[in-house]
Image (cartoon, rainbow, N blue to C red):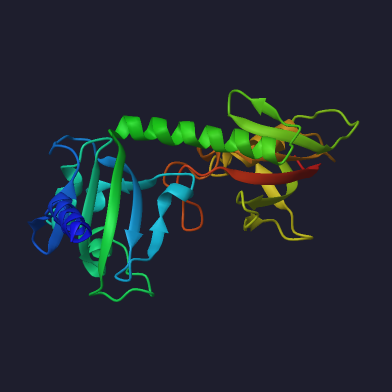
Amino acid sequence: MRHLIIIAACLVLVGCSKKELRQLGDISYDRLGEVCQDNKWHWLLDIEATNSRDSVYLDSRGLGRKVEINSRSLDTASHLYQLLAETCKEDSLYIELTAVEFYGSLKGEVPKHLSDSERIHVNVWMRDKLTDIGYVSFKQTFEQQVMASYTQQNRWNATLDTNTQIYYELLKRSESNQEKFNKAKVKYVLKSLNEQVIAYSKDGDPFVYDINDKAVIGGIQFLAKKLKVGESARALVPSSQAFGAYGNMRVSGYTPVVLELEVLEHIQ
């Protein structure tokens, strides 16, 4: 009898300790901190998402970088936007909602392993909120850290050019003299940090670099001017000397790239 009373008391305590969720539209939620408002549009989050079978299918904390959201791109009328916008830096939010509302509000697509109507449980940690200037500083600092780590892990014997922030390493040297030129034939390959080829010059059809062509990315300009005829080098090129803050169809913004280039000849 005494054991039954103890068990019953424990059940009561557990039931009482479970916090009742609040409701906003079809979203059930609980917030750890206070509601706050600010004009910082760039959000850095960690997200843990669990499906209806209580199986964690997403945990950004193991990715080595934060989930980045530009809140200007979201549907500001959505309930999820409202909850995130009112979550302060270093606070957290627990939400229960349908997969389609979660991913749709974030301008994404529901993963194939989830149905649109499946209710998922999501923990959100608001790690930081940044202004436009603060976001640029964050991305540049993160990029510099990635580049330094890449050269160390891949054991590059690289020199850092402080003007361009390009890391470069000579692969083949030449005893020829450095010449002034207007155009040069170069062979190159441009790759992502995970070795995916982005662009390259074809065998037998070298790229003609013209020093007056400012549309050529800074990394190619830098190596073409730095190297003598017959020399080659590899370089880790920051986004400021590659595809910039916005990137293109193949490269994201603020993304460094790897360039290998050989100067074949000066033609003018």
Q: Could you tell me which residue is drawn at 69 percent across and 49 percent down?
A: 208
Number of disc labels:
0
Outermost residue toward the front in this view: 1
**Quadrant, the N terminus:** bottom left
Examine the rendered structure and indicate whether residue 37 appears above or below residue 191: above
Residue 234: % across, % down:
72, 41
Q: Is residue 111 visible?
A: yes
Work out whether residue 213 or residue 6 is closer to the camera in this orientation and state it.
Answer: 6
Quadrant of res 31? top left
Residue 214: % across, % down:
54, 39
Outermost residue toward the top in this view: 162
Residue 16: % across, % down:
12, 52
Work out whether residue 160 or residue 126 is closer to the camera in this orientation and state it.
Answer: 126
Examine the rendered structure and indicate whether residue 169 appears above or below residue 4: above
Q: Could you tell me which residue is drawn at 22 percent across and 75 percent down?
A: 117
Task: Answer left or right for 255 relative to 220.
Answer: left
Task: Answer left or right for 21 relative to 156.
Answer: left
Quadrant of res 172? top right
Task: Answer left or right for 142 relative to 135.
Answer: right
Work out whether residue 9 or residue 66 is closer to the camera in this orientation and state it.
Answer: 9
Q: Could you tell me which residue is drawn at 61 percent across and 48 percent down?
A: 193
**Quadrant, the C terminus:** top right
Q: Can residue 78 be seen in this view?
A: no
Outermost residue toward the right in this view: 175
Residue 82: % across, % down:
14, 50
